[in-house]
Image: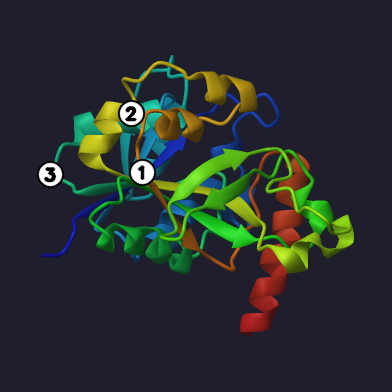
Amino acid sequence: MKMKVIGIIPARYASSRFPGKPLAKLGGKYVIQRVVEQVGAVLDDVYVATDDERIYNTVTSMGAKAVMTRSDHQSGTDRIAEALEKIGGNFDVVVNIQGDEPFIQKSQIETVMACFNDVGTQIATLGKPFATIEEAKNPNSPKIILDNRNYAMYFTRALAPYIRGKEESEWLSAYPFLKHIGLYAYRTDVLDKITKLPQSSLELAEGLEQLRWLQNGFKIKVGLTDVETVGIDTPEDLERAELFLAEQNKNEE
């Protein structure tokens, strides 16, 4: 039986680094519009979950679906849980798509959805091999430690695992260090459970929400991807994205 999958895009207007980001224009279209268009082809349904009427009105006026949610959510996961409750519709899996990823690839969604072919998967996310050890040392790029069935054993900002008896320059050839790409999907009954969990000690230590789920015994399957896209956190990122888009369009001509 085919799984019924919904994509929900949490989008807030307020942002410390880039207020109004979802409604910024990129190549003549709103950033949020591009996200909706990129993922619409592979999912059964797509909704934008927002706490701002400007975003709600813009999204619905372009013929896409949106749902209003509370403004006091601690995380995107909580916003998605409220949105799903409002939407209803008996979905098996919900994909949490970042509203600032206008170049998200169809293949990334397909990879994360394929994780649910394993009945043991409760939550799924993506990992991509690091290109250099310098990249892997960056605490803003969390590392994933996998078991032999590609379930996450741990996520960390530290450089892990430690490679004993080798120069650091040789570490990458000794072990496939894996970068976490923050696209998540959840079985809908699991989403309901994880949003009721209190913050955990490992989550607070590393500042990584997914450690709350691991620490409480939930199984996170990791799909492997070689695709990483350009996210938009600042106005400078938007300028870079414009160049990236122009380059893409040139290549397609």
Residue drawn at the location 79% of the way across and 60% of the way down: 171
Tag 3, which secondary structure? loop
The answer for how far apart the CA atoms under marks 1 and 3 are is 22 Å
Distance from disc 1 to disc 2, alpha carbons, whole Å, reads: 11 Å
Residue in front for this viewpoint, 185 or 98 = 185
Q: Amino acid at mark 2?
A: Ile
* Residue drawn where x is 29% and y is 34% of the image: 191
Residue 90, label in figure: 3
From the viewer's perspective, is the residue at label 1 or at label 2 nearer?
Answer: 1
- The one of 178 and 91 positioned closer to us in this rendering: 178
Residue 38 in sight = yes
Near mark 1 (Cα within 10 A), the count class, few <14, some 14-19 or many ≥20, is some
Query: What amino acid does circle 1 point to?
Result: Lys
Using residue 238 as the reference point, say whether residue 192 is left or right of it: left
**Amino acid type at image mark 3:** Asn
Q: Is residue 33 left or right of residue 163?
A: left
Q: Which residue is mark 1?
A: 219
**Horizontal arrangement in the rendering, residue 151 relative to residue 23 (left or right):** left
Q: Residue 198: give x, y in percent of width and height.
A: 40, 16
Query: Dividing the picture into quarters, in which one does residue 57 lie?
Result: top left
Residue 69, position in %: x, y?
34, 24
Q: Quadrant of residue 16?
A: top right
- In this rendering, which labeled residue sits more in front, label 2 or label 3? 2
Q: Locate the C terminus by quadrant.
A: bottom right
Which mark is first along the chain, 3 or 2?
A: 3
The residue located at (10%, 65%) in the rendering is 1
Of 242 and 85, the residue lying toward us: 85
Of circles 1 and 3, the one toward us is 1
Q: Alpha carbon of mark 2 to alpha carbon of mark 3: how far?
A: 18 Å
The x, y position of residue 48, in whole percent, is 37, 40
Q: Is residue 54 above or below residue 61?
A: above
* Residue marked by disc 2: 194
